[in-house]
Amino acid sequence: MPELPEVETIRRSLLDLVGTTIDTATFSAVAPVKHISAAQLQMALAGQRLMALERRGKYLLFRLSSDNALILHLGMSGRIRRVTDDAPAPKHTHMTLQLSNGCALRYVDARRFGVITLATHALQNPYLANLGPEFDDPQFTAVAFIAQCRRHPNLSLKMALLNQWIVAGLGNIYVCEVLYEAGLNPTRPIASTTETELTRVHAAIRAVLTRAITHGGTSLRDYEDSWGQKGGMKAHLQVYGRDGESTLDGRGSVVRIVQQGRSTWFAPEIQK
DNA sequence: GCGATCCTGGCC
DNA sequence: GGCCAGGATCGC
């Protein structure tokens, strides 16, 4: 479900918990814990102080006093909720962190496409190993972006932005929005694009993600931050989910196509 | 590259 | 019952 802006919004909603200690960590029998057993992870988390909360692409990183980091990915349906009472855990609660301030964090993920894992110091973890740069990294320049794109000439623009190695954090919503803003057809292969066009894509990535974070992400169905607050970016989407309608700004009409099994929305008259 | 696959749930 | 869903990996 969540892309970079949603994960970033969740991260910010958790920042007041930095400095608290994880008293206990418990897992469901089918928790999507990877590369370590739930029992080992439970031991690695108990008694740990939460030193910092970071984000890498769509991954949320809980830095621990042991120098390890708890890594969470929310997949399609993952949510993180905080609770201060002892209300029963909702269905599909796969991890509960009981914190020293009396608050508990719940990781809820119906489809279990998410990931719960542990990284050692320096964030050694296979899930983070092949991630591309952050969109706001000073080293993520238009020149660097174009150079990475040119290594994959056969990829369509849609697929190039959706994989996580050219730039990290984009998902289906924001890829559609970025390509609308750049005025490019999502089916265009990288090889057919000019430097100018890719420079526009680079600028659009930065603009769209920044705007989405400002609005607290996009709540289509069930995305909320850890307080249960929905994001307001949906009201600003130009093309995503609007097949048969006009773009939000009224400049064109939106169609839906399918690329490698994923829906793409775009406005053919505007995106060439 | 492309489709299949991992899952559950909501909607038509 | 069928289709769709904010993701990513793994085959051929």
Image (cartoon, coloured by chain):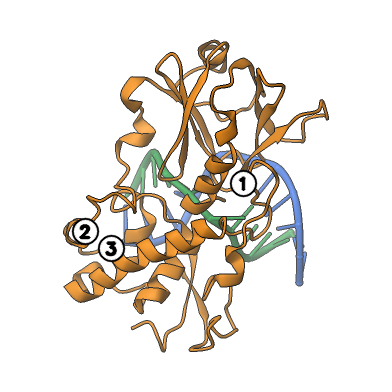
Chain colours: A orange, B blue, C green
Question: How far across and down, in percent of the image, does residue A16 sit?
Answer: 59, 33
Residue placed under numbered mark 2 in the picture: A152
> Is A148 placed above or below A121 here?
below
**Image quadrant assignment for residue A97:** top right
- Dot 1: what SS? loop
Residue at 51 percent across and 80 percent down: it is A255
Q: Which mark is residue A77?
A: 1
**Which of disc 2 and disc 1 is earlier in sequence?**
1
Q: Amino acid at mark 1?
A: Ser
The residue at the far right in this view is A87
Q: Which mark is residue A155?
A: 3
Q: Is residue A107 left or right of residue A57?
A: right
Q: CA distance from mark 3 to mark 2?
A: 6 Å
Residue at 63 percent across and 46 percent down: it is A225
Question: How far across and down, in percent of the image, does residue C8 sit?
Answer: 42, 44
CB atoms of marks 3 and 2 within 8 Å:
yes
Front: mark 1 or 3: 1
**Image quadrant assignment for residue B10:** bottom right
Question: How far across and down, in percent of the image, does residue A148 sit?
Answer: 20, 56
